[in-house]
Amino acid sequence: MLSYEGFKSQVLEDYCVAMVSREASLLGRREVLTGKAKFGIFGDGKEVAQVAMAKFFKPGDFRSGYYRDQTFMFATGLATVEQFFSQLYADPNPAHDPFSAGRQMVSHFSTQLVDDEGNWLDLANRKNVSADIAPTAGQMPRALGLAFASRCFREVPQLSDLRSLSNNGNEICFCTIGDAATSEGHFWETINAAGVLQVPLAVFVWDDGYGISVPKSFQTTKGSISTALRGMQKEAGSNGIEIYKVKAWDYAGMCQVFEEALQKIRDTHTPAIFHVEEMTQPQGHSTSGSHERYKDHDRLDWEKEWDCIRKMREWIVSNNIATGDELDNIDRETKDQVRQWKAAAWEKFISPIKAQAKQAAGLLSDAVVSDMDSYQQLRELSAQLLANPEPLRRDVLHAIFQAAALTAQSPSGEAIRELQEQLLKEGKSLFNSHLYNEGPKSALSVAHLQPSFSEDAQVVNAYEILNRYFDALFTNDARVIAFGEDVGYIGDVNQGFAGLQAKHGNNRIFDTGIRELTIMGQAIGLALRGLRPIAEIQYLDYLLYGLQPLSDDVATTHFRTNGRQSCPVIIRTRGHRLEGIWHSGSPMGMVIHALRGMYVCVPRNMVQAVGMYNTLLAGNDPALVVECLNGYRLKEKLPDNLLEYTVPLGIPETIREGSDITIVSYGSILRIIQEAAEQLEKEGISCEIVDVQTLLPFDTGHLIIESLKKTSKIVFVDEDVPGGATAFMYNQVMEVQGGYRWLDSAPRTISAQAHRPSYGSDGDYFSKPNREDIIRVVREMSAE
């Protein structure tokens, strides 16, 4: 309970935050239009709803939002206006833009979740923000996972000791989304999953009537997302969601509804939608255009009349909380303060670049060259750098690059080239680092330990190795949670988890609906909150449904937060050789190009797969593990040290020694390659077979080159389409590693056909590389 003075102070503080945010939006747009910033998208019109929402955001809670939540960040104290402008200017200094170090456009926020060593911080006692992404509704799957983690922390007894990660699952995930983006499938799949799972997810829909220029009557059934969702309304004895409707200009009404509803979510884990209607958008969608192009005069007049800050001001005055003059003073002080913060951010951004420009200009001006033309060009480059009032790093390097060529034969050239190398190195650190973990939690830093086998080691079905491994893993590490279609009750379609749900509990190993997108979302949220999810996509062919959050969210998390967040999901799936279009997928080229920022592991057997799981669980990097679909019932020896041995990522393994030709591949096709090699050996052709083991990373020690030096011939084989992963491997060995130097015949690739594999054994034979294909190509190469 607040005293009247306390109440008044809080209201005026909220009004001040709203005004600060509005002024930041207005000045931000101006900075873009004057050329100081590249692009702007702002939260004007949403200020009052966000200050009301922020009042109930507590330590331990998470936000999974979109790019109009600046007011919320200001109100919670998680962002300053100066930081907001630093991000607008794309300042790469993490001390200035702690959210992304200039890697994301304005209003893409985050908070630090891991320390410099990769250890999870005390998230239960911090206000947390998962790193924003721009794809519309892309925040929804992750939001489900962040909320689902609270359910796990509340219901899984083994997690009760992780008090730094959760306070008994009391945390809410606050998710924000624009009304037009509720048309995306991501929204509907997430809301359905939340209603089924009963997780503490609070979704705030900002409804300003448009999706850029398209009115919501074209977007949503019945023109109202809350009306369209009525069938999901929770009733007694059912699951479902709660639905609330509020007005964006009604400060007092929103505070009352939010307070009661959010406490209910916290207590009962019942998800809710808050449909916040009658929002305005004073500056339109973004700096790329004007909303006067698509809004008529009546709409524009209405937006002025019902502007949320104007209505809040009227409410304050009418309730004698403050006078108009007092609010005018707040307005003036606010505008002055925001201008100061903006100026400070700009100065911090531009000063180091000007210093670079001045240093470079001095070197260029003082350079000694033998001909007058070069001398004049250097003077002009120097003058241009000094005359540029708003230089960029690229401007400095443009000039230095030209100067290095002009001074190639001059003693002055050495200093210019040294500066060039220094600035390139600095730029790489600022703009190209942290795609993966670079510290102790890098999966590449995990020590290699070989599997050990006793003399009387059991020979078992390969799936039994996985089953025994997962049993030991779940016994040993409470943080591990596994889920997916058919994973729980029947133990996955290939029995890797058979019997383990009954032993370890249906809250740690469980089934999901057929919804690959939000299976990925559950994994993301659990990983961001410090758990170690193993999420299953039943077949690699189905990964397409879940690829977007992996590509846009998981693969970029560490990079776009400059290392402040990690998302160590393990996506387990199976693919390669089997009969039929939808169960024999090997779209590895698509995967490796879409998932830079994840590791892609392609084990040829299950012993190897277990070692990869151990490696990944020892680090913080996300990964996709593609097991061989046709390998589960093949026989393998059972290692003694299932939980200890590791497979190093990026280190190929030579599985057959040879002297005449190197064959590079991975996964199921290796067995066919070995059959071909045995036949070729009888013909006097000795094949060396190299299993790359992982496509990302790929042969970090250039071991394939050592094989090529010996054989002078190389062929790359896989089951992807022509130009897929074979082209990637070819590029890595021939271009990146310089393999062309050791060739005495043209390198070749052998891939599947361009179409999906036809059904049946003959369809498989003609669709994917077969033994005869490999023998024929190797014979041709040997005859050259």
Image (cartoon, grey):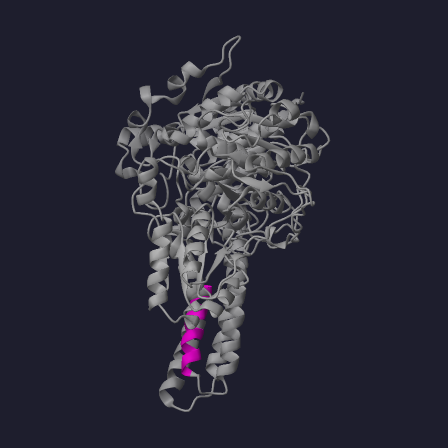
Placement of 158 over or under 293, stated as above or below: above
Placement of 183 over or under 757, stated as above or below: above
Placement of 531 over or under 197, stated as above or below: below
Q: Is residue 1 visible?
A: yes
Q: How many marks?
A: 0
- What x and y, as percent, mark residue 469? 63, 37
- What x and y, as percent, mark residue 693? 52, 51
Q: Is residue 317 visible?
A: no
User: Which of these two is toward me, 320 or 200?
Assistant: 200
Q: Which residues are magenta?
A: 392-406
Residue 394 within the magenta-colored segment of the rendering = yes
Point out the residue furthest to the top here. Answer: 236
The quadrant in which the C terminus is found is: bottom left
- What x and y, as percent, mark residue 384? 40, 73
Point out the residue furthest to the front here. Answer: 682
Point out the residue furthest to the bottom here. Answer: 370
User: Which of these two is toward me, 736 or 380?
Assistant: 736
User: Which of these two is toward me, 188 or 171?
Assistant: 188
Q: Residue at x 49, y 13 (%)?
A: 234
Magenta stretch: dominant SS? helix
User: Which of these two is toward me, 658 or 670?
Assistant: 658
The quadrant in which the N terminus is found is: top right
Residue 280 within the magenta-colored segment of the rendering = no
Horizontal placement of 110 versus 301: left or right?
right
- What x and y, as percent, mark residue 685? 42, 63
Placement of 659 over or under 133, stated as above or below: below
